[in-house]
Image (cartoon, rainbow, N blue to C red):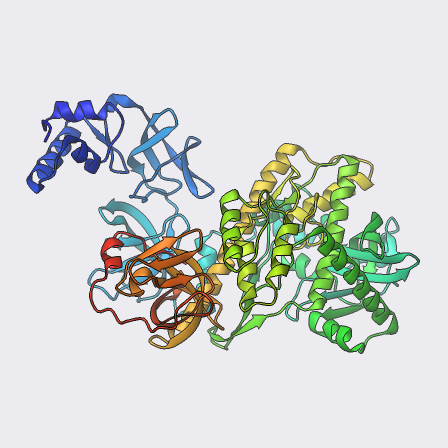
Amino acid sequence: MKTLNARAVSRLLQSGPMAQDKIAELLGVERSRERRDLRRLLSGMTRSGDLIQDHQGAYHLPEAATLVQDRLERAGRNLTFRGLTVDTGKRSWLRPGDEVEARVSGEDVRIVRVVERSSDPLIGILRTHTRYPYVDSLSPDYKGRISLLEAPADGQDGDSVVIKIVDEDRRGLVGTVIETRVRGGGVHQASDTMLANFAVPLAWPEGVDAQLERLPSRVNAGGHRDRRSLLEMPLVTIDGETARDFDDAVFAEKRRGGWRLVVAIADVAHYVRAGSALDTAAWERSTSVYLPDRVVPMLPEAISNELCSLKPDVPRLTMVCDMKVSPSGRVTGFEFYQAVIRSHQRLTYTRVQEFLDTGALDVPLDVRQSLTALDQVYRAFRTAREARGGLDFDTHESRLELDENGHVAAIHPERRVEANKLIEEAMIAANVCAAEFLEKAGAPALYRIHEPPKVDRVEQLRQAFAYAGVRLARGEVTPRGVCDALVELGDVPNRWLFEFLVLRSLNQAVYSPDNKGHFGLALTRYMHFTSPIRRYPDLVVHRAIKSVLAGKGAAFSMDYLAATGVQTSMAERRADEVSWGVDAWLKCEYVAQRRGETFSGVVMGVTEFGLFVELTGYYVQGLLHISELGSDYFQFRPQSQALVGERSGRRFALGDTLQVVLRDAVPEQGKLDLQLLSAPSGRTGSSARAPKDTSKSRNRKKGANRSRGKK
């Protein structure tokens, strides 16, 4: 052992901050008594000011960096301090809004201490089944257990509670319950908790009510002579059975050399003036949030469900994209204009699909003729999409059926029929036209951009296809190449899994004033124009088009568009997180009633700590920890997405079908804990039954410090 004294430690730390274990290693400290002496020495040097221990637990010399005090901020998934990314280390108990003291050396930030805790409360689930009650935080800013100073007087196990953080200890944050938010389980608790967790705005700010009162109660069709009248055109809305806001209506007719396609979109910009209190509130929300029991709208219902909703047989103001479509599915000409319309029918996807299948529908002849032409246009658009390689999958999704108490009664598969795709293709065409129109006018707006996948994700996808005997072309991946690989795959079992892998490999689409194309649709330019009732970027595009039509040119600065792109992309992710959180909560709550039962499942993800298995028919995943696979030691093979036994050669891979037992469930966190009943079936696995392992396996010993993972 090297000399153990303050001078030796100081000399060692001149090369940079170090954790105690690293210091011990470099000083040759091995025995327990020597480690105790080192711990006492470091503590003494810290008390005397000769050393600084930062919030991550590392020690460094006081003069090695500049001491600065400021608040932490959130940037994506990272915490930042004055624009620099913070390495939170193992003790990730920091939150945005915490005022901290940090030592900054170049780009390196070390948090020394928390000066003042963020005043923002956390939302979590109260646990009272142990000797010392605690709260499981559900906040995106802090995932973990919060110790309580004292048990709440009226709290019950499983209640959603609001926590004020007051301190921390060696296990994590310490807080006190300041409010019991909701209890009872089911959709009410799930929705309320997730909306509060992600701080989704629910109340309308001051000034909005007064603005709504000044809006007209109805549309006077004859009072808008500056608009084209399409009142007699048999436009119809086609939406799901439960839809309440109708922002698009369509019409098509056969023309010489192709078709005329008209897409009329609710003219929200006519009523929501830029810079108003209503507009500011819409910007902050940026998108409507759709949950099983409610909708949190971007705009008040007086607009979204009434004045701007394209209800049948009443006049409405719209922005129209009027297109000429060739037999090959190419838009050969288009124009935008403002119009007054009247929806002639409120149709559903189910009714339209019945018409497409049988040719029968109890609506006027002109509506049936338009639907026939729309189907023809759709098939031309489909041909064009396939030619350019645009991706199009039948999504592996589900719909929850709730009982009268707000609990899940059944889970149904959600099917996309041709009627859905008909509307989707019409909307895509109008969105492309909006981008082309504004580009030609030199008027910037917000593009919907979808960049190509990262190299590492492409390589994982390539390996998955290769294991199925399909070659994904080398070099830069293209939508055409992915489509060709899926075609070559053929009609294999669990084909949807490969489509899921493709979707998982893709980047998330975002909004930006800089056009970078849309990879998934294989389009060089794309904007969102067709849903201004529920998406703020569409409202921006409407305003840009209106400005050009009025001869005013560009409506927005690039700085405004850049900020709006960041805000709307964030709000879209927030809405998705809330929706996914509620969905997983309710499904896990539904499945939790069957603890101890056996399920069939498909391996959807492979990691070094285990397998994520989707329970067949329930559309929810659980974790099968690596320690549950038997007494063998399993190695993670990322190239083939598999866990392979070191001695037995047993293999657990993506796409395997397993029989698993539901051992435990934590619905609020969307977690299911699974146990293996039998080995994989299908092309990659053995049919041998997994031996029951009652001893501590090598996996558990070697993986004791691994995370169990989160769904």
Residue 440, horizontal then vertical, whole percent: 79, 37
Q: Residue at x 66, y 65 (%)?
A: 244
Using the rendered view, name the quadrant where residue 117 is placed.
top left
Left or right relative to 131: residue 485: right
559, above or below 672, in the image: above
Using the rendered view, name the quadrant where residue 89 is placed.
top left
Say which of 614 and 510 sits in front.
Answer: 614
Quadrant assignment for the N terminus:
top left
Residue 629, horizontal then vertical, whole percent: 31, 65
Say which of 44 and 493 sits in front.
Answer: 493
219, above or below 46, in the image: below
Left or right relative to 335: residue 643: left
Q: Residue furthest left?
A: 33
Q: How many marks?
A: 0
Quadrant assignment for the C terminus:
bottom left
Q: Residue at x 81, y 61 (%)?
A: 377
121, above or below 360, in the image: above
Residue 267, horizontal then vertical, whole percent: 75, 52
Tell me if residue 562 can be seen: yes
Say which of 351 and 116 sits in front.
Answer: 351
Left or right relative to 649: residue 583: right
309, above or below 457, in the image: below
Q: Residue furthest right?
A: 256
Tell me if residue 217 can be seen: no
Q: Residue at x 79, y 36 (%)?
A: 441
Say which of 5 and 576 sits in front.
Answer: 5
Residue 655, horizontal then vertical, whole percent: 47, 64
